[in-house]
Amino acid sequence: MSQVSSVLRRVEGGFAHWCPGCEELHRLPDSWTFDGNLESPTFTPSFKHEWREHVCHYVLTSGVLNFCGDCTHALAGHAVPLPKLKDEGMGDDD
């Protein structure tokens, strides 16, 4: 893993960013469309991460996480700027 900007880390098969709703890294696969902006990225389509009874679903546009209403965390329905990564040891990527 290598940090490529203040908000993105390059990981095997994609990019990772910190999710403030899940409090962990999420991986966006290389197969998603990426606008190339490392500081205020846009990735499409939406990303939906499901595990056990939890759901995190969002659209990342111009560096803003637009969380969908089906998220099971407290940020459902909110728009939140993509947080800066703290260090290489911050969480595990998904």
Image (tube, grey):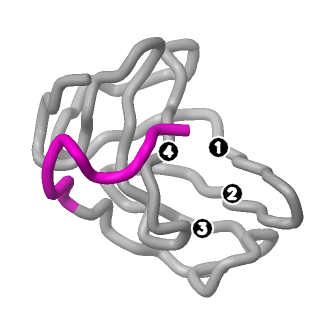
Q: Which mark is residue 46?
A: 1
Q: Dot 4: what SS?
A: strand
Residue 85: percent from the left, percent from the top?
20, 53
The secondary structure that most of the magenta stretch takes on is loop
Q: Which mark is residue 57?
A: 2
Q: Which mark is residue 26?
A: 4
Badge 3 crowding class, 10 Å Cα cut-off, few under 14, some 14 to 19, many 20 or more, is: many
Q: In the picture shown, does residue 12 fall above or below 41?
A: above
Residue 45 versus residue 16: which sits nearer the camera?
Answer: 16
**Residue 56 lies in quadrant:** bottom right
How far apart are the alpha carbons under marks 2 and 4?
Answer: 11 Å
The three-letter amino acid code for the residue at tag 3 is Phe
Q: Quadrant of the C terminus?
A: top right
Do residues under tags 2 and 4 come within 8 Å of each other at their CB atoms? no
Q: Quadrant of the N terminus?
A: top left
Q: Which mark is residue 67?
A: 3
